[in-house]
Image (cartoon, rainbow, N blue to C red):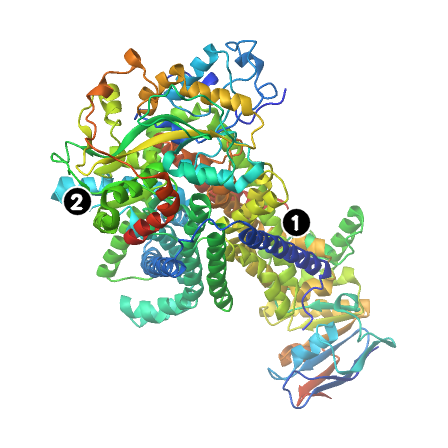
Amino acid sequence: MQSLPQRRNRIVISLTLAALITGVIAAVLWAILAAATTVSDSGSSRIDILHLLRMTSIQAGLTTLISLLVGTALAWALNRLRFPGRNMLIGIFSAAIVTPGMVVAFGMLSIWGRSGWINQASLAMFNVSIGNPAFGLSGILLAHVILDGAFAARILLARLDSIPQERLKTGQSLNLSPWTRFIILDWQAMRGTLPGLAAIIFLLAFTSFPIVLLLGGGPANQTLEVAIYAAVRQDFDLRGAVLLALTQIGVCSIIIFSAAALPAVPSSLGPSSTKSWRDRAWALGLAWIVLGLATLGFVLPLASVLVDGLAAGLINLLSTVSFWHASATSLIVGSISALLTLTFTLALSLGRSASASQQLRIVLGLPAYAYLAVPAVVLSLGGFLLVRSMGIAPGAAAPYVVVFANALLALPFAVATLGPPLDTIARSRGKLIRSLGLSSWQQFKLIEYPLLGRDVGVVLALSFCFSLGDLGVIALFGTQDFTTLPLLMFRALGAYRSDDAAAIAAILLIGTIAAFEALPRLFERLAHARR
Amino acid sequence: MARPLVRPDHLTHSPSHDRNPKGMTKWSSQLAFWRLRSPWDWLPRQLLPRINPRSQFILTMVSLPNGARAVLSNLDSRQLAVASSILSPLTGSIGALRRVQLEGDTTAADVIVGLDTAIAGEARATGLFADHHLDLSGLKLPEPWTDKQFVPFDYSHFAIMYDTDTIPTPPKSFEELIALPANIKIALQDPRSSTPGLGLVLWIKAAYGDRAPEIWAGLKPHILTMTRDWSESYDLFLKGEADLTLSYTTSPAYHIIEDNDETIKAALFEEGHLAQIEVAGVLKSSEHQQLARDFLAYLTSVDGQKIIPMTNWMFPVVDLGADMNPIFATLPQPAKTLTISDQDIAKHARQWIDEALTTIQ
Amino acid sequence: MLVVDRLTFAYRDQATPYQFSFDAKPGEITAISGPSGSGKSTLLDLLAGFLSPVSGTIATNGTNIVRLPPEQRPVSLLLQTESLFEHLTAARNVALGLSPKTPRTETKVAVDAALNEVGLSGFGARLAAGLSGGQKQRVALARTLLRARPVLLLDEPFSALDDGTRGQVRSLVVRLTSFHCWHTILVSHHIDDINAVAHRHYRLDNQKLALV
């Protein structure tokens, strides 16, 4: 079929970019391998890869399972209930994907720690202590489920909201019980999304860095990612780090390749439509309980960050010069990485949507996932060794490496946002575009950009927020002269200034949520203003 | 004039700002890196009124607590001014060593402050450190100082801290400690990144030898977390997240002097305690060898040492006489000091850390 | 004259290939009917250039166009739905019929004239999404006017319209075809539409066309 517009340039550009990204990653891996063979072995490696792999898999598996359960329940409740502020609440849950792990980890302690709100309330009311679930495996799982459960709920809710009205009317006329409806309507709508969603959540948990670093409780609970960091920064065991990095790349690649065969998870979603379904009272009651618990579970840690941060340390923090420098650095790094992510995403997705060959589409789809296989700490370590082997001071190369790595960080989600709609346009409007003989630029300016303005904003917001909350890359590269807000927060925690850390966490939280909510709207408006 | 990315906070802040509300800060652990460089290209002139025109360099601190500020003013009066900033005090002082190893000759650091005698052997073996060429015969230490690369600047005994409000009868040995109910939690430091963390591994080994894994297995249910750095775990202890933490026999002095709080105490163990001597060293790659040595000389001088007890809350390495706060003399000290030879540490430290970590995994 | 001669095409796994032969005269509407799945869309895609035939020719006024890519064929296309970009205004949609290098004033004059010819003067600033079904098809016809291609392919253009509008759009197509001497090919399974407008009528059955 030749109904796709012929866009040779787009394909060439995206192939070039794919080759470039592959090249950079290959160079980084080469640098790691080279370092591993030249650096003298500083004693026996104490890394037990099988143990780490087992612990990480158990943690990621549990996270995935619980997140999907919580996500399904929350999506079901949100789908059934209509109330003022529903859209705002959905917006808050949507922001889970960009909420920095550090912020959640910080909020966890205020809520779930021994002197946290829940234990204090439990002690006051029942004189029973819940112990300290904020640390160790329970802490990691809680923090992950807060983020990934909300993410899963948002994706699954979109599936539920897209059940055709006619099917619902038929179901209502048959007087289906809530359980039967869930099985024959809701479950059918969600089922297709679950494997892909599970793969993403598993990968996120498998490569989790700041949450595990802050709440893991030390060597007992680590991810491979944290173990790599520890091997480099605590043991100077580069050989061990390389082994871990290769293991991580292997495992993640297997998951990505098996997930690539599954349908893509749409991550950009429009507003939910209104639905008419009269539920039984007990089902409505259950929905309210689920919604209430989920909202408390998600909002409380974040609220505590705001309360702690804005109350205590804010004024002091605002008067420090290092804070303003870190803020400026964060803003600049975030903006440039966001633009870079958008450029990468457009180049890759436009090329992919213009190619008819299945093989070409797979080749152009892979760079997007490079980052999940070669995550922050590995890329950062490789970049570090690469610039060092070239005789450049890591400090001098830091801004470039951090911006590039941050741009790759959001790429899988950005491509999942822009790729499918661009494909849809190319396929559904291809005949018309081609028969009118529109140029590539006309196609982009008149058709693709105006239709995708909001998604462009979503991509920018995702990338900006990911970069704003990144710790994995900056942790190895940051210096006193090149510090972002998460790094400043991390230092404040390590330097015994938890008031400063709380204030930075609050600012990060406000910044990410504001950017995530505002940028898509802004770009939707800009795109519409042009027509 | 080019504007600096990092401006000297101590010159722009009101003095009250850096007063940490929780007060105590063990600054050597944050001050892992010092970078010395010329100020002229990046310091606005109007910020330099107090600088003696004969100064070659100016000491600049970024986000440092009271103690370091005190060091600064003293340095000014001595007309030795040193420009410095801290590079990534991120992963404890051992982490700072790792960073220098990673960066090799490209590192911007000149001096590392806050290693201890236990890690000094490994640090020396990297070949990254230059000889200090200082005469340290005047120091008052348990044994005469012979190290050619590292300069000691304070010492104390490791100890488990507790609060008399929550633990009225403290454990008197590791065996009593591990016999406490499981809901009593302790915040420890990672032996791979923090010198107290490493110190605990050595301490238990020195006290129990082959029985050390038993002690670690007994500690396992009590361990709330292992932090990268001393300050993080001490913070958890003060916040009430943990009942116990690993610190020093001198730590209670801070709470008595600053907060008039006598409830926070160091538990004395019958099997004896291990001492830590903190050291600093100059990197061979530094372009400011003389300046760096001058700084170390100052750090070990009576003037410099006067600042240590009340800021780092450790014993000084010189006899301060009347300048020493009398509270320190009232602190209970262990009856028995354990030692472990440098050779044994060099040979077995890694294996002992593995043993401890494997047991608690 | 548009002459399609033994235009042969088969999908993979298809036993008997399609073989199309027919001709269409300028100023006339040539209708092609047939049941669903008989191959009407395949024929349209072959004529528009979205499919490449195994053999055979398509000739307009003696020139074989079978090797030309879709955008270079002397062909305009009007689909059942989605013939417009709904997020653009009517005028912008019509202007897509012109080369992008056309000066702005010239474009405006041409667009206004075309909209006027299909009876929609004054609708230029409206968003396509806000137009009725009949108005959309008329805007698409206005775009065809500017493209000035001798062959117009219509794919069920009236089926989404109600009865009143249907009549109006049908007579507009007849009028434009004869006035501009288009070779209009109408693919439809509505026998009413065919009877009302077609000069000639082929029926597609068993992979072949037969004159009715």
Q: Give the image location of residue C189, x and y in percent.
A: 62, 80
Q: Is residue C150 left or right of residue A147?
A: right
Q: Nearer the viewer, residue C129 or B176?
A: B176
Q: Nearer the viewer, residue B339 or B298?
A: B339
Residue C186 appears anywhere in the view = no
User: Do dots 1 and 2 share one subunit?
Assistant: no
Between disc 1 and disc 2, the foreground one is 2
Q: Give the image location of residue A148, x and y in percent.
A: 38, 54
SS label for mark 1: loop
How many C-alpha atoms fall within 10 Å of the one at disc 2: few (<14), some, or many (≥20)?
some
Residue B326 appears anywhere in the view = yes
Task: Please say if A221 is above or below A262.
Answer: above
SS label for mark 2: helix
Task: Please say if A62 is above or below B243.
Answer: below
Q: Is residue B197 left or right of residue C30?
A: left
Q: Nearer the viewer, residue A391 or A223?
A: A391
Q: Residue at 55%, 43% (x, y): give it.
A: A402
Q: Nearer the viewer, residue B10 or B35?
A: B35
The quadrant of the rendering that contains the C terminus of chain C is: bottom right
Q: Which residue in the protein does label 1 denote?
A: C125
Q: Which kind of residue does numbered mark 1 sit on?
A: Ala
Q: Which mark is residue B175?
A: 2
- Label 2 is found on which chain of the structure? B
Q: Which kind of residue does numbered mark 2 sit on?
A: Glu
- Are dots 1 and 2 in contact, CB under 8 Å? no
Q: Give the image location of residue A138, x and y in percent.
A: 28, 52
Q: Residue at 45%, 20% (x, y): give it.
A: B297
Q: Is residue B334 left or right of residue C54?
A: left
Task: Please say if B302 is above or below A376.
Answer: above
Quadrant of the rendered image containing residue B287: top right
